[in-house]
Amino acid sequence: MADAIGQQELRNDSASIMRRVEQGESFVITRNGRPVADLVPHWLPRERGQRTIGELQALFRQLPPVDAERWSVERERADQTFGDDCPADQP
């Protein structure tokens, strides 16, 4: 859970607070005891273990192709059970 710090504390100790944010800590900034903002680390995708678009594309290329006929049949069955979900057809 994020620590709450007052606006004045943020102003007075910004250098040490920013170092703590760089280390991964988060803070809720308050004004007169009321939360007004979140101060959180700005993670780059690679730092969070996320993949790049190129890596995702390479993974998707390894998936088997979609059977369009089977997909259509399954969608028709779902529409019969749950109703059509096309927003253009709804009033």
Image: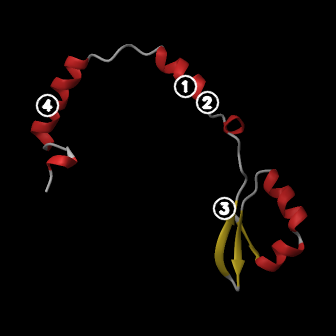
Q: Amino acid at mark 3?
A: Met
- In the picture, the disc for residue 71 is none
Give the position of the C terminus as an image quadrant.
Answer: bottom left
Question: Label 1: which residue?
Answer: 56
Give coordinates of residue 18: x percent, y percent. Answer: 83, 59
Give coordinates of residue 14: x percent, y percent. Answer: 86, 67
Q: Residue at x 86, y 56 (%)?
A: 19
Q: Amino acid at mark 4?
A: Glu
Secondary structure, mark 3, is: loop
- Say few, some or many: other residues with alpha carbon within 10 Å of mark 2 (under 14 / 14 to 19 / 20 or more): few
Q: Earlier in the sequence, mark 1 or mark 2?
A: 2
Q: Nearer the viewer, mark 3 or mark 4?
A: 4
Question: Disc 3 and disc 1: Cα gap in Å?
Answer: 31 Å
Question: Label 3: which residue?
Answer: 1
Q: Are marks 1 and 2 in contact (CB under 8 Å)?
A: yes
Q: Quadrant of residue 78?
A: top left
Q: Residue at x 19, y 31 (%)?
A: 75
